[in-house]
Image: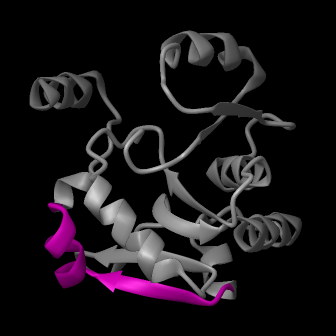
């Protein structure tokens, strides 16, 4: 990410902070750890907390389990988001990728807060209240393979990803 973004905001539980600081030691850009204020509120609350800590107008949001982020696609998302509240990929059978998107930080944080206040925990719900642009799969493929959206959920998937990254 160092070649794409100027700073990094990582959302985590308070008990994860020390381990994250150790893991990110040596990263050559500013790092902010945005700790959850309440436990187990889900990814939407984490996105909200992270975006509240952002010091720029726009921010790229990525899930922590996505090891194949492609800088060219992230750059394109920033380009497409300009003048809007969000730029989000849509791939496969029309699946939005809200944890691989660029958001106007204040707008998405406010939308997440409103959705949580209404009892919603669906990560896609805040997006639909924003002025967003979509990068369809054909445009995504101009900048990255669809591997960029892969996530890791098991030890076997982790081992496979580690092998690919070597």
What segment carries the magenta color? 130-145
- Residue 40 position, x and y percent, is 73, 38
Q: Reply above or below: 59 against 115.
A: above
Asked whether residue 149 appears in the rendered view, the answer is no
Is 111 in front, or is 102? 102
Asked if residue 48 lies left or right of residue 90, the reply is right
Res. 164 image quadrant: top left
Locate residue 108, reporting x and y percent.
70, 70
What residue appears at the point 19 percent right and 62 percent down from the top-left corner? 144
- The x and y percentages for residue 22 are 56, 9
**Magenta-colored stretch includes residue 85:** no
Measuring from the top left, give residue 21's x and y in whole percent.
Answer: 61, 15
Q: Nearer the viewer, residue 157 or 62?
A: 62
Q: Is residue 165 above or below residue 51?
A: above
Q: Is residue 144 magenta?
A: yes
Residue 120 occupies which quadrant of the picture?
Answer: bottom right
Q: Check the picture and name the quadrant holding the C terminus.
A: top left
Q: Is residue 83 visible?
A: yes
In the image, is 88 to the left or to the right of 92? right
* Residue at (34, 82) in percent of width and height: 135
The residue lying toward the viewer, choosing from 112 and 7, is 7
Q: Residue at x 53, y 55 (%)?
A: 61
Q: Is residue 34 above or below residue 80?
A: above
User: What color scheme is it?
Assistant: one colour
Rendered residue at 28%/22% (across/down): 155
Quarter of the N terminus within the rendering = top left
């Amino acid at each position: 990410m160092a070649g794409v973004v100027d700073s990094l905001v990582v959302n985590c539980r308070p008990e994860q902070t020390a381990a994250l600081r150790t893991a990110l030691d040596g990263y050559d850009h500013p790092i902010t750890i945005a700790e959850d204020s309440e436990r187990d509120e889900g990814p939407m609350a984490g996105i909200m907390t992270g975006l509240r800590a952002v010091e720029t107008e726009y921010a790229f949001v990525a899930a922590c389990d996505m090891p194949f982020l492609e800088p060219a696609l992230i750059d394109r998302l920033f380009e497409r988001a300009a003048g809007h509240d969000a730029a989000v990929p849509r791939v496969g059978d029309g699946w939005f990728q809200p944890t691989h998107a660029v958001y106007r930080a204040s707008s998405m944080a406010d939308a997440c807060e409103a959705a949580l206040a209404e009892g919603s925990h669906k990560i896609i719900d805040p997006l639909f209240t924003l002025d967003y642009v979509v990068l369809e799969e054909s445009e995504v493929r101009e900048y990255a393979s669809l591997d960029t959206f892969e996530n890791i959920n098991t030890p076997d998937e982790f081992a496979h990803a580690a092998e690919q990254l070597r």
